[in-house]
Image (tube, helix red, strand yellow):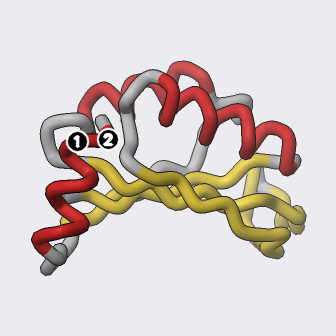
Amino acid sequence: MKIAWTTVETPGQARELASATIEQGLAACVQISGPVESVYRWKGKIETASEWRLTFKCTDAAFPKLESFILRSHPYETPEWLAVNAAHVGEAYLRWAKSSE
């Protein structure tokens, strides 16, 4: 499985992305947390923003379509998009995830 993250500006944007990925079978689960405070450099200036973090869980097979959808649908010009492979996944959770997508 993969675990992937992005952030958006509002809780509404977070819910919209989460719902769309679940409805389209691109992720088994999406968790929304926030607000989180982000500090970063953008176009030469240090910026601070309150954002909402989405954590996606998906199978390896679903990941390419999830990534394509997020990068195409994300409201940011340059969205954060990070993904890692899960080192271990419980068998029951993995079976559920595969049946959910």
Residue at x 88% of width, y 67% of height: 48
Distance between mark 2 and mark 1 Cα atoms: 4 Å
Q: Residue at x 63, y 30 (%)?
A: 74
Q: Position of residue 98 (x, y in %)?
A: 19, 45
Badge 2 crowding class, 10 Å Cα cut-off, few under 14, some 14 to 19, many 20 or more, is: some
The answer to whether residue 38 of the structure is visible from this angle is: yes
Residue 59 shown left or right of residue 21 in the figure: left
Q: Position of residue 7 (x, y in %)?
A: 67, 54
Q: Quadrant of residue 101?
A: top left
On screen, residue 8 above or below 75 = below
The amino acid on which the numbered mark 1 sits, given as a three-letter code, is: Ser
Residue type indicated by callout 2: Ser
Q: Splitting the image into 4 quarters, where does residue 18 fall? A: top right
Where residue 87 appears, as percent x and y from the top left, is: 14, 78
80 or 54: nearer the viewer: 54
Judging by the rendered image, the residue that carries numbered circle 1 is 99
- Along the line of sight, the residue nearer the viewer: 49 or 96: 96
Q: Secondary structure at mark 1?
A: helix
- Label 1 CA crowd tier, 10 Å (few <14, some 14–19, many 20+): few
Instruction: Look at 71% across and 35% down and name the residue there.
Output: 76
Query: Quick one: SS at disc 2?
Result: helix
Q: Count all numbered tags in the image, as a single digit.
A: 2
Label number found at residue 100: 2
